[in-house]
Amino acid sequence: MTDVAVFVSCDQCNARAYIHVQLTGGGTLAYCAHHGHQHTPALQAAGATVLDLTHMLEG
């Protein structure tokens, strides 16, 4: 779904994306932890596949 070594920014802000979403229609989304946790429940309910890499956050 995504190469974790490549910097990807959140689709809503400029922070690093740690949550990557594959939509059922084939599109993708990338979110920082903050925005990802806001949107993940609805996306999963719609059938999207979510890769949550927030365990890789520093600090």
Image (spheres, helix red, strand yellow):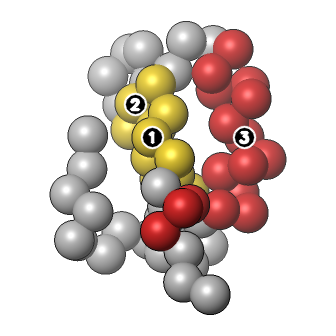
The amino acid marked with disc number 3 is His
Residue labelled with disc 2 = 22
The amino acid marked with disc number 1 is Leu
Crowding at label 2, few (<14), some or many (≥20) Cα neighbours within 10 Å?
some
Mark seen at residue 39: 3
The outermost residue toward the right is 38
Residue labelled with disc 1 = 51
Residue 42 as seen in the image, left or right of residue 58: right
Which residue occupies the foreground of this view, 33 or 26? Answer: 33
Q: How many numbered discs?
A: 3
Residue 17: x %, y % from top left: 48, 65
Indicate which label's residue lies in the foreground, 3 or 1: 1
The amino acid marked with disc number 2 is Gln
Q: Quadrant of the N terminus?
A: top left
Residue drawn at x 51%, y 21% is 48
Crowding at label 3, few (<14), some or many (≥20) Cα neighbours within 10 Å?
few
Q: Secondary structure at mark 2?
A: strand
Residue 28: x %, y % from top left: 38, 38
Quarter of the rendering containing residue 47: top right
> Mark 3 to mark 2: distance in Å?
13 Å
Name above or below for residue 26 compared with residue 3: above
Which residue occupies the foreground of this view, 9 or 19? Answer: 19
